[in-house]
């Protein structure tokens, strides 16, 4: 049985913090090539310097995914730097806002749709054809338990995370004849800055490295095997 995955090239969004950072660092430490993107340029530059000091194969570009033209620049740059081959796309970057519907604003709506939904759509639209040509590839969309269930105060966030699972289903169906897999990962509380105010101690949260492990598991499956959406629950709660 094959237990070791050959070296691959990945594009990870939201790689400057939390889950994306853990995924990018983990893949790099295993010898894979990672194109990292985040909004915070100085943080990204520092991470790239550190990675290169360790001899890791890291590259990247700071990009505000809420701006369509910046997403397009990211796609052009990443495909060029990765020489037109992308084995894994991790649509991870995301933002959250919680509050009753009266407390939300149309501006919040636009912002969440742009970052959590339009950016993964644009990236997938550009990268699925590359993977189809390769006849291999994995797109991982980081949804949430809030993409499976909605609560009072979660309207905008849940809308985007439910919709991301809709995108996932179509990408999976369209990529399947070409050997390209798409899976949504739906975690509960993960210990990252995004949920620093949550009513759950960090030590009782899912760890960002658990998402890395899940992606490695998906990548290691044989070509005909794919998982449905993966719900990663916190032991004893959401
Ligand atoms: N933490 C949780 O409990 C949890 C649970 C379920 C799902 N998720 C999902 O997991 C994903 C990652 O979240 P996290 O917890 O790791 O959050 P995080 O620590 O706040 O990291 C979010 C990442 O997204 C990037 N980002 C945000 N807005 C951006 C923009 N406009 N343009 C480009 N990049 C942008 C951030 O970049 P900068 O830092 O450079 O601005 C950062 O790298 C999100 O989609 C989130 O919804 C999280």
Image (tube, rainbow, N blue to C red):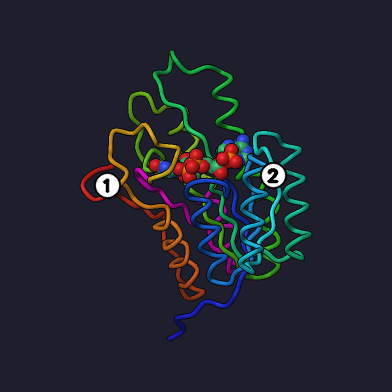
Magenta residues, as a range? 168-190
Task: Please give the residue where the numbered disc 2 appears in the rendered image.
Answer: 62
Magenta region includes residue 173: yes
Q: Quadrant of the N terminus?
A: bottom left
Distance (Cα) linking label 2 and label 1 = 32 Å
Magenta region includes residue 130: no
**Residue 144 coordinates in the image, percent (x, y):** 41, 43
Task: Report the number of numbered marks.
Answer: 2
Dot 1 surroundings within 10 Å: few (below 14), some, or many (20 or more)? some
**Residue 51 coordinates in the image, percent (x, y):** 62, 61
Instruction: Give the residue displayed 68% in from the left and 56% down from the top.
Output: 127
Which residue is farthest left? 236
Whether tag 2 and tag 1 are in contact, CB under 8 A, the answer is no
**Residue 4 coordinates in the image, percent (x, y):** 49, 80
**Residue 233 coordinates in the image, percent (x, y):** 30, 50
Position of residue 171 relative to residue 178, above or below, is above
Task: Please give the residue where the numbered disc 1 appears in the rendered image.
Answer: 204
Q: Mark 2: is the Cβ under 8 angstroms from ligand 1?
A: yes
Image quadrant where residue 6 sits: bottom right
């Amino acid at each position: 049985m094959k237990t070791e995955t050959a070296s691959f090239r990945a594009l990870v969004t939201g790689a400057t913090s939390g889950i994306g950072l853990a995924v990018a660092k983990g893949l790099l430490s295993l010898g894979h090539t990672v194109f990292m993107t985040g909004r915070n340029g100085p943080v990204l530059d520092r991470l790239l310097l550190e990675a290169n000091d360790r001899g890791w194969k890291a590259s990247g570009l700071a990009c505000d995914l809420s701006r369509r033209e910046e997403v397009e620049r990211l796609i052009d740059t990443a495909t060029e730097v990765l020489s037109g081959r992308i084995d894994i796309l991790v649509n991870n970057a995301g933002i959250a806002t919680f509050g009753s519907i009266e407390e939300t604003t149309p501006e919040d709506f636009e912002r969440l749709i742009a970052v959590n939904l339009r950016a993964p759509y644009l990236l997938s639209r550009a990268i699925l054809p590359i993977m189809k040509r390769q006849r291999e590839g994995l797109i991982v969309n980081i949804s949430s338990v809030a993409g499976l269930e909605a609560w009072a105060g979660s309207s905008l966030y849940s809308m985007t995370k439910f919709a991301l699972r809709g995108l996932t289903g179509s990408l999976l169906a369209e990529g399947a004849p070409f050997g390209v897999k798409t899976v949504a990962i739906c975690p509960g509380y993960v210990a990252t800055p995004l949920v620093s105010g949550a009513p759950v101690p960090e030590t009782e949260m899912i760890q960002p490295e658990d998402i890395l492990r899940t992606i490695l598991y998906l990548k290691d499956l044989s070509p005909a095997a794919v998982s449905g959406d993966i719900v990663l629950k916190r032991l004893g709660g959401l």
